Amino acid sequence: MHPGQKLKPGARVVFERDGVRLQGEVVARHFHGRRTIRLWADGGIDMAAAIDRIGHVPLPPYIKRQDRPSDRDRYQTVYARERGSIAAPTAGLHFTDAVLASLASRGVERTELTLHVGYGTFKPIRAARIEEHVVDPEAFAVPADAAAALTRARREGRRIIALGTTTVRALESLTAGEDARITASMGETQTFIRPGHEFRLVDGMITNFHLPQSSLLVLIAAFAGRERILDTYREAVGCGYRFYSYGDAMLII
């Protein structure tokens, strides 16, 4: 809760907009402003509908304006299907239906999984040693058709390119048999990918530029090498590339 880091259990908050009234009560207090809260909407309004009507889309600090209704579509991937993420997987924002169609026309096979981006993706590393950092769990589901597509790619020696670092975490959490078979799976991943991790499925990734002291920056350093990533970031900063949600992306293979 920001602002509101001093709110203690039992504190009540009210959100109102466009005739909708949403109430909340702090149930438990955690570190760094995190709270467990209970929400309810007055008048029997559906909770998701109330949040949609009251809530705002978070914009990066370099976008100097208030959010607009169109941002609700722009801050979303074209292939999103289900509610559950606390934010859009930003690497996917670069893809349009036309881009996906162009990839398909070139023989690039695409498969989908469900991933709910969680707070752990954005939690900064505050520990002195990265081994002491804990990445919060993120829910994911890999259906049978996606598992079959991944299995075919491995058996045929084709590259598996993950779209987004959160997708990398989900893929690297899957069970792979000795016969290269990937098993359909549903659950949570708490995998913290850091230097020393042996990548089993992912051969490449498309990812945005990440902030310092983030687990995502550690992940790509584990994949491509720390010095190579630092050189890349120095080049990106020097050329004015943008970070944050609407920032630029790169392909790492």
Image (cartoon, rainbow, N blue to C red):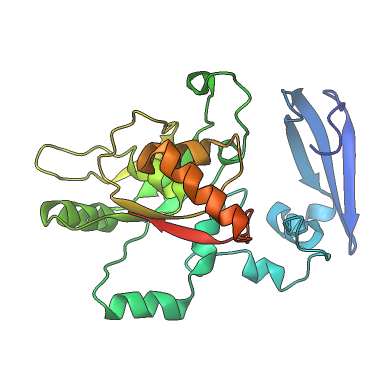
Q: Is residue 67 something one can see in this rendering?
A: yes
Q: Position of residue 169 (x, y in %)?
A: 41, 41
Residue at far left of view? 179
Q: Closer to the camera, 99 or 224?
A: 224
Query: Percent x, y for residue 62?
Result: 75, 59
How many numbered marks are there?
A: 0
Q: Residue at x 54, y 23 (%)?
A: 133
Side (left or right) of 228 relative to 245: left
> Depth check: 81 or 249 in front?
249
- The relative height of residue 74 versus residue 201 in the rendered view (above or below) is below
- Does residue 252 appear left or right of residue 180 in this picture? right
Which quadrant is the N terminus positioned in?
A: top right
Q: Quadrant of the C terminus?
A: bottom left
Q: Is residue 51 above or below residue 136?
A: below
220 on left or right of 19 = left
Q: Residue at x 60, y 34 (%)?
A: 213
In this rendering, does residue 209 appear at all? no
Identify the image quadrant of residue 35. top right
Viewed as shown, does residue 43 lie left or right of 49? right
Instruction: Point out residue 75 in the picture as x, y percentages from the top left corner.
Output: 63, 64
Q: Toward which corner of the image does residue 162 lie, by quadrant? A: bottom left
Q: Quadrant of residue 188?
A: top left
| 27 and 203: which is toward the camera | 203
37 or 67: which is nearer to us?
67
The residue that appears at 77% across and 55% down in the rendered structure is 61
Q: Position of residue 105 (x, y in %)?
A: 28, 81
